[in-house]
Image (tube, rainbow, N blue to C red):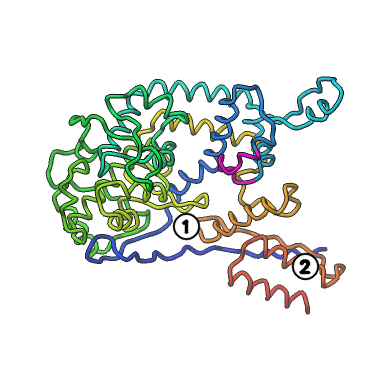
Amino acid sequence: MPRLLLLHLRRSPQPYPSIARFIHGGAGAPYGRDRGLDHAVERERHLRPLLALKDLLIRRGSPSLPLSSISAARSRLRLPFRAARFVRAYPSAFQEFTPPSDGGGGGGGFASLRPHVRPTPDLLRLHEEERGVYAESRGETGDRLLKLLMLTRRKRLPMDALEGLKWDLGLPDDYAQSLLPDYPDYFQVVPSESPDHGPLELELVCWIKDLAVSALEEKSESAALAFPLHFTSGFEPEKKLMRRIEDWQRLPYISPYEDGGARLDPEGDQHEKWAVGVLHEVLHLMVSKKCERWDLLRLGEHLGPKSAVFKRAVASHTGIFYVSHKNRTKVVLLREAYRRDRLLVEHPLVGVRHRYVHLMRKNSGGANDKRKPLRGDSDGGEEEEEERGDLLEDSDDYVDDDEEEEEVEIVGNYEKVNQSDRMDSIRGQLRKSKCTHRSISRGRDIRRKVEH
């Protein structure tokens, strides 16, 4: 009878590390992984490159596109791995086929053997639904873009910076042609004032006083507005920390649309509360109430607060904002807008994106499975490197106490199998399970038992 050994690997939760400052003056800030908010980010894994490829296929106007053309545009589409593997990973969204030969002589028949890609009927149906949402929300999208320009210091924003924000702002892929020309009274595209800002900028044309009201001001008329606080589940703030937070919250609230905060002391609490208010309003303008940290910091260079204070606002106020490290990036989320992994108020465009995610999961071929075996990958070393990076990233994730134990099954007939085969089996199982030092020690104990 073969003996069955079970090696239980439990990844213990990491302690909350302290952050340099929660508010100016020094109290330590709580920080921990929020599984709900992390899932809100991880759920959209590969969604942006899939929609970028969809837009490329439809924008060309032809019924299909050669796979080689998609491979050439891989960096622009931000495909996570080779184009052939990406297309085959989502058969519910893309169809790979070989066009029939035209029957002519020469090289025409050989050229027709090149694989082509076209969108599936389900993907085209969702695309039409997405276009309908863009058409219905054009006025609201123009207002949000106008409010973003009203937040900037020079009332201008480089088109390059806006390009990085179009996904989070809910702008269509061709917004420069389909949206901007329709609002000449709101903004206009002008030559840049500095080479550092790129060739073109979007300039504010008209200040609309009725729109210069922040989301926090809409909820209250008090001068000392307080930001809603939501800490990671299981965290109990100390009394000393809560007193400092309450004192900071009682400071006067300066609207992010006012320039008064720019004249404050950059090292003071009041300036930092103004910077937090600006970031709070920026995230409210995003359709999903989240944005990549890099895009936020790049935008922060053109907003009112000092760049260093804006960075501190992103990193330090973890009761207001949350930074997720999922999908090999850093995404800043507005805590108050979420209940677990769902938005309290969902924009219609976000609902369409969720339906795209549902379509991706149908017959996805394990594209979203981070623990997919690496051996035998037919796409070569480049994709294997990508998978290894995902595994390394996931090994440091915070795990709650109630997470299920991982069980690694090591099976062997220790009376019939030679010792070298048994040792190779144990090493392979330990490598696959990303085990910790404690797990390795258990593995050594098993190895000593096998050797004896």
Choose top left, top right, bottom left or bottom right for residue 148. top left
Q: Nearer the viewer, residue 187 or 209?
A: 187
Image location (x, y in percent) of residue 202: 34, 35
Question: Where is 50 relative to 186, above or below?
Answer: below
| Residue name at image x 33 percent, y 28 percent | 142
Q: Pointer 2: what residue?
A: 424
Question: Where is 395 relative to 182, above or below?
Answer: below
Q: Which mark is residue 400?
A: 1
- For label 1, the crowd category at 10 Å Cα-Cα, with few meaning under 14, some 14 to 19 and many 20 or more, is some
Q: Is residue 340 magenta?
A: no
In three-dimensional space, the C-alpha distance between marks 2 and 1, rounded to whole angstroms, equals: 32 Å
Q: Is residue 73 magenta?
A: yes
The amino acid beneath tag 2 is Asp
Q: Earlier in the sequence, mark 2 or mark 1?
A: 1
Does residue 54 appear to the left or right of 316 in the view shown? right
Does residue 121 appear to the left or right of 348 in the view shown? right
The amino acid beneath tag 1 is Asp
